[in-house]
Amino acid sequence: MYILEYGNQEEPILVFLHGGGVGGWMWNQQVDYFKNYHVLIPTLQGHGDRSEETDFSIRGNAIEVIELIQQKKNEKDIHIIGFSIGAQICLEIISLAPNLIKSAMINSAVVIPMMSMIPFISPTIKMTYPLTKNKKFAKAQAKQLYMDGDYFEKYYEDSLKIKPTTLINILKENMSYTLPENFAESTARILVTVGDKEKGLVKKSVQRIVDGNDRCEALFVPNIGHGFPVAQPDLFNKVLQDWIEHQKVYSL
C-alpha cells in the first residue's frame, strides 16, 4: 500500500480515504489544519501511484486500511474520514473491525444499491473513456467535485493514469454497495454528512446509515453538492474537529 504520512506520530491517528477517481491530494487542506495529529492518507487500489492495478473492491481496500491501522496504532485512538467511495470503505472498516475505530466521519456515502445500472457500466465507460484525455471534458467532470480550480491539474493528471477496467470496477462496487449486516455492532461514534444539493440517493442513504447504528448522527450541509471537504474546507475542518475532540456535531 502507498501512503502519505504527516504530523505528530505521538498523537491520535486520522486516516483520510479519498474518493473514486481522485487521490490523497484532495485532503491537502485537512493535512495543514490537523498537523498536530498523526495523519495517514492511503492511496486506494488502482489510483495514482497504484494505477497499474486494475482490481478494486471496497472490502479489499477496507482490509488493507485495517492492516495499516494495526501497524501504526500502538495505544492511540483512531479516527477515520472518508469521502464518497472512501466513505463506503469507512463503513466497511467499522463493520469488519467493530471495536478498532474511535470515531468516523462518513461524507456522501451511498448505501442503496442501483443494481439496474450495473449492466450499463462497462459499455458506457468503454465508450466515454477516450474523453478523459480531453481537458474540457475533464474540467466539466472536475467541476462536479469542486476540483476545477487549484486541484484541476492534479485531478487531470490522475484521470489520465486510471485504467478503464479500474473505473468499471470502482463504479460496480459503488453502485452495488449496501450496509454490512453487522454494521450495528460497531462501537465507533459515526457522523454522517451530506450536502443539501446532492442527489436524492445520497440523501436517502444518510437515513439508512443512521438507522443502522445507534451511535450515528447526521449533518446536512447547506449549499453544498458532492464535495464538502474541497468546496468548504474551513467548515469541514471545524465539523471534523468538533466531532473528534468535543464529541459533538458542529452547529451550522
Image (cartoon, grey):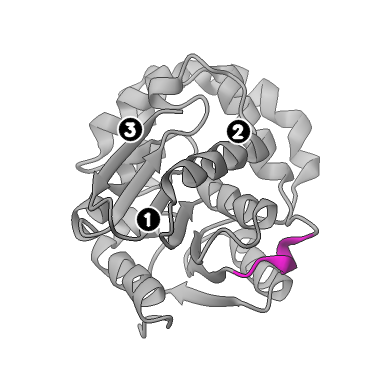
Alpha carbon of mark 1 to alpha carbon of mark 3: how far?
A: 26 Å
Q: Are marks 1 and 3 in contact (CB under 8 Å)?
A: no
Q: Is residue 10 left or right of residue 247?
A: left
Q: Which residue is mark 2?
A: 170
Splitting the image into 4 quarters, where does residue 61 fall?
A: top right
For the question of whether residue 132 can be seen, the reply is no
Q: Identify the residue shown where x is 65% and y is 73%.
A: 210
Q: Identify the residue shown where x is 55% and y is 70%.
A: 190
Q: Is residue 86 left or right of residue 133?
A: right
Task: Name the one closer to the observer, 216 or 161.
Answer: 216
Q: Which residue is mark 1?
A: 13
Q: Is residue 120 above or below residue 94?
A: above
Q: Which residue is mark 3?
A: 155
Range covered by the magenta-colored residues: 182-187
Of the two numbered discs 3 and 2 on the same chain, state the one appearing first in sequence: 3
Total tally of numbered discs in the picture: 3
Q: Where is residue 17 shown, x and y percent of the image?
A: 45, 46
For residue 84, which numbered disc appears in the image?
none
| Disc number lying in front (1 or 3) | 1
Q: Are marks 1 and 2 in contact (CB under 8 Å)?
A: no
Q: Is residue 26 above or below residue 8?
A: above
The secondary structure type at the circle numbered 3 is helix
Q: Where is residue 90 shown, x and y percent of the image?
A: 56, 53
- How crowded pointer 2 is (Cα within 10 Å; few <14, some 14-19, many 20+) is rated as many
Of the two numbered discs 1 and 2 on the same chain, state the one appearing first in sequence: 1
Of the two numbered discs 1 and 3 on the same chain, state the one appearing first in sequence: 1
Q: Identify the residue shown where x is 20% and y is 56%.
A: 35
Give the amino acid at mark 3: Tyr
The secondary structure type at the circle numbered 2 is helix
